[in-house]
Image: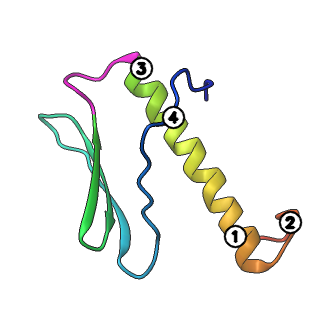
Amino acid sequence: MTRRRTPRNSMIRLTTGHAARTLNHPFARREPVLALDFGATSVLVTTNGPATAEDLQFARQLAHAANRFAHSIERSFYGLPDGKEVAA
């Protein structure tokens, strides 16, 4: 990811748990929607019209960050400092 050019002025923390889930809605005739549900709070990620190269770049960055997040959770869950022997 690129370095942030502007400072953060707010942050929202959404924690995972039994009510957290993700849903992908790949609509045929409109922009796809990725829903991140945290109980009573939902975050919807979509494009602003037809997909652009920037949208694709963001989607790939999001997927890469989510993969790294999952890997970190696996290391923590299994108590492994280097992530080796983590279940696939």
**Label 1 to label 4: alpha-carbon separation:** 21 Å
The magenta span reads: 47-53
Q: Quadrant of residue 28?
A: top left
Q: Which residue is mark 2?
A: 84
Q: Amino acid at mark 1?
A: Glu
At horizontal 44% and vertical 35% (from top left) the residue drawn is 59
**Label 3 to label 1: alpha-carbon separation:** 30 Å
Question: With respect to residue 3, does 87 lie above or below?
Answer: below
Looking at this view, is 63 or 88 the one in front?
A: 63
SS at mark 2 in the image: loop
Q: Which residue is mark 3?
A: 54
Q: Is residue 37 left or right of residue 29?
A: right
**Label 2 to label 1: alpha-carbon separation:** 10 Å
Q: Which residue is mark 4?
A: 60
Q: Amino acid at mark 2?
A: Lys
Q: Which residue is mark 1?
A: 74
| Percent coordinates x, y for residue 38 in the rendering | 34, 68
Quadrant containing the C terminus in the rendered view? bottom right
